[in-house]
Image (spheres, rainbow, N blue to C red):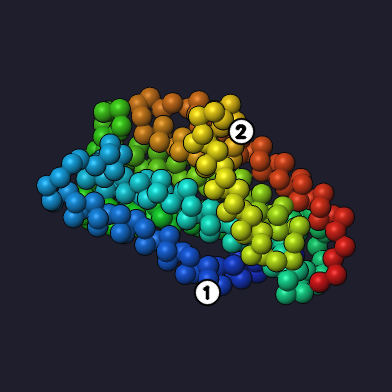
Amino acid sequence: MSAGSSRLLRSELTLVLGRRRNQVGMLVLAAVPIVLAISIKVAASAPGPEAPNFLGSVTQNGLFVPLAALGMELPFFLPLAIGLVAGDSVAGEANIGTLRYLLTVPVSRTRLLVLKFTMIVIAAAVAALLIVVVGAAIGIPLFGTGRMTLLSGTQIGMGDAVLRILIVTAYVVLCLASLGAIGLFLSTLTEQPIGAAIGVIAIDVISLILDQIPQLDWLGPYLPTHHWTAFIEVFRDPINWDPLVDGVFVALTYIVVAWLAAWARFSSKDVTS
């Protein structure tokens, strides 16, 4: 990456992470594992029905808190965060009249799209890691750590558990990046960033709904969100890699197709703002 591109990427990240709305969004993402951990701690001390298997595992090891939080935030909160960032990537620049000035840096349109997508991926990584770090920070003091009991009943050591959590985090980031690529394409179609962000959320919600209709089972494997929950397979022994490989393939396909669509649109777009 050239010095000019590096400076532009740093500028983009500073702008994205410095926006008040994005900072508030990060606080909301970080609050979920805290609320989840405290709620499970309170519920565990009161009589009542046992929690579902995955949530019930939280009380046995605090490292399950970030995993449970990722599972809860993946359907909507994380897509919302990525939708806002991706929707603002190109449309936001056009909306405030800075897009044509960016293209005179000089930075080619192709390189600018690469930088914008890189920024989206970094934002996805920051969001996912924030949930994991906060979840571990609150989960370990409340529930302790040590050997982790997997969903299949096997116990693993701390090092193996952390490695599996990192694999899950990377997988979630890739899933979010695929949605971010779609958002990047939508952002090239409009000068209203909120419109592109709403489009991303609509695709997320529609995909989740279609995936729940039995008559459309044939469509499920091709939906962008279908394989997202496959990360749970990482916490079985042995790991069932097939759903994860399918998820990676689908995510990469959406990334390539959406980015190329964004490039085709942006490279021929008449930029006047």
Mark 2 to mark 1 CA distance (whole Å): 36 Å
Q: Circle 2 — which element?
A: helix
Residue 33 visible in this rendered orientation of the protein = yes
Q: Quadrant of the C terminus?
A: bottom right
Q: Residue at x 66, y 59 (%)?
A: 196
- Determine which residue is flagged by label 1: 20
Q: Residue at x 59, y 61 (%)?
A: 84
Quarter of image, res 67: top left
Q: Quadrant of the N terminus?
A: bottom right
Specify few, some or many for label 2: CA neighbours under 10 Å numbering under 14, 14-19, or 20 or more: some
Estimate the x, y position of residue 247 in percent, counting from the top left.
55, 34
Disc number placed over residue 257 in the picture, else none: none
In the depicted structure, whether residue 98 falls above or below residue 245: below
Question: Given the image, on which type of amino acid does mark 2 rest?
Answer: Tyr
Disc number placed over residue 222 in the picture, else none: 2
Estimate the x, y position of residue 6 in percent, counting from the top left.
69, 62
